[in-house]
Image: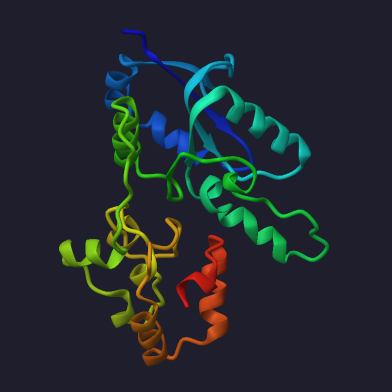
């Protein structure tokens, strides 16, 4: 049985998601016995022809990047958006609020068909392995359909709102094991909105804690989360 040919491609981004993949070390080596990596700029450069799976990191900006992205799509059976920048344009999309900015970075799906996505900034390494394993088995991977609050409750973590700190956890997709909350921070929304977020209860929490419309809009802009989808 021939190995699946996979490649990793980076556009406008910090390449932190690819570094997360490299940091998997032994777990990654085991999977590499099942695949042939033909492109990975962090460690090698090869050909983009006839790929089974293309993992693409970074947002897209400018005609040169759009053309390159479409070439990758043309030669790949499956395209995976790797990380927040590829998925939603992420932090890069803040450029649209800069004076004189005429061309803000866009997510992959603005230009090509995306078959699968792994959200996060950076991605969760274990989730990457699960997605890759699913694709190798010709099974469509599924992201968690519940909010980050579920993971926080299961881990018995204190709610950041109790410390009067604004958190996007009630409407953001789970799957990161609440890593930021565990570290003493709050959720800033890098995994994007959960499907069908319960906006009304969240809006009541925001009102109870005196969060203004301007404040929550600013929070949603950080990772380019469209506020209208959670209203």
68 lies left or right of 179: right
Q: Residue 71: percent from the left, percent from the top?
A: 65, 27
Residue 108 versus residue 159: which sits nearer the camera?
A: 108
Q: Is residue 226 above or below residue 47?
A: below
Q: Quadrant of the N terminus?
A: top left
Number of marks present in the image shown: 0
- Image quarter for residue 61? top right
Which residue is situated farthest in the top direction here? 1
Q: Is residue 118 above or below residue 139?
A: below
- Image quarter for residue 153? bottom left
73 lies left or right of 20: right
Q: Residue 74: percent from the left, percent from the top?
A: 61, 26
Instruction: Identify the residue at image location x=29%, y=82%.
Output: 162
Q: Is residue 169 above or below residue 179?
A: below
Instruction: Identify the residue at image location x=40%, y=70%.
Output: 168
Instruction: Identify the residue at image location x=57%, y=74%.
Output: 218
Q: Residue 108: percent from the left, percent from the top?
A: 59, 44
145 lies left or right of 215: left
Q: Residue 155: percent from the left, percent from the top?
A: 17, 61
């Amino acid at each position: 049985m021939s190995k699946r040919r996979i490649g990793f491609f980076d556009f406008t981004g910090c390449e932190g998601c690819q570094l997360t993949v490299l940091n998997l070390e032994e777990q990654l080596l085991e999977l590499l016995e099942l695949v042939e990596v033909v492109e990975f700029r962090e460690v090698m450069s090869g050909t983009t022809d006839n790929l089974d799976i293309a993992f693409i990191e970074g947002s897209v900006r400018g005609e040169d990047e759009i053309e390159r992205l479409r070439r990758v799509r043309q030669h790949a059976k499956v395209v995976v958006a790797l990380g927040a920048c590829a998925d939603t344009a992420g932090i890069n999309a803040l450029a649209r609020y800069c004076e004189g900015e005429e061309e803000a970075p866009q997510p992959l799906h603005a230009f090509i068909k995306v078959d699968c996505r792994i959200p996060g900034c950076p991605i969760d390494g274990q989730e990457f392995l699960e997605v890759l394993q699913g694709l190798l088995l010709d099974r469509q991977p599924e992201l968690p359909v519940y909010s980050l609050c579920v993971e926080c409750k299961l881990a018995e973590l204190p709610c950041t709102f109790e410390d009067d700190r604004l958190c996007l956890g009630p409407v953001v997709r789970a799957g990161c094991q609440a890593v930021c909350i565990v570290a003493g921070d709050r959720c800033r929304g890098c995994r994007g909105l959960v499907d069908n977020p319960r906006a009304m209860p969240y809006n009541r929490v925001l009102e109870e804690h005196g969060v203004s419309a301007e404040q929550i809009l600013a929070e949603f802009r950080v990772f380019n989360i469209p506020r209208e989808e959670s209203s």
